[in-house]
Amino acid sequence: QVQLVESGGGLVQAGGSLRLSCAASRTIFSIHAMGWYRQAPGKQREFVARFTAGGTTTYADSVKGRFTISRESAKNTVYLQMNSLKPEDTGVYYCSGYYGTSELWGQGTQVTVAS
């Protein structure tokens, strides 16, 4: 069973930065469309950023220019660097991907941005 484990969340002031990590239990190149999603209190889960099938990256308009998704294959880890954080970025951030036809989700990590 493939597992995804997020870490790096926390409390930060508006304008600050955080880096989230998503560690996979096997090589990340066997997991397709790895990316990040978030869920704010009382709202539906929404897309944040992910790798495409061609290895390029795509972002939600709300985070373009502020967030960067990257990966380190040697550590089987995908990162989300979040800069210029805003209170509206608050939520639980989840890592996701597909292993074969199985959709994978991590347990989430809480990000709170104080104004």
Image (spheres, rainbow, N blue to C red):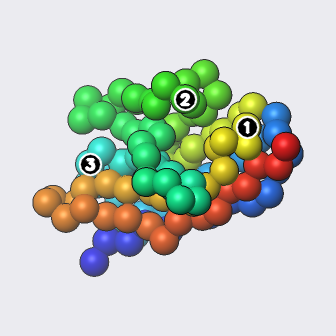
Q: Is residue 84 visible?
A: yes
The reply, left or right, for residue 45 in relation to residue 63 is left
Q: Earlier in the sequence, mark 3 or mark 2?
A: 3
Q: Which mark is residue 32?
A: 3
The reply, left or right, for residue 99 in relation to residue 101 is right
Q: Which mark is residue 62?
A: 2
Name the residue: 36% across, 27% down.
56
Q: Is residue 64 depicted above or below 18 in this figure?
A: above
x, y (%) of residue 74? Answer: 48, 52
Name the residue: 38% across, 65% down.
105
The reply, left or right, for residue 42 in relation to residue 28 is right
Residue 96: name its quadrant: bottom left
Q: CA distance from mark 1 to mark 2?
A: 10 Å
What is the three-letter code of the residue carrying label 3?
Answer: His
Element marked by disc 1:
loop
Q: CA distance from mark 3 to mark 1?
A: 29 Å
Q: Are marks 3 and 2 in contact (CB under 8 Å)?
A: no
Q: Is residue 38 depicted above or below 53 in this figure?
A: below
Q: Which mark is residue 86?
A: 1
Other-residue count near label 3 (Cα within 10 Å), few / some / many at <14 / 14–19 / ≥20: many
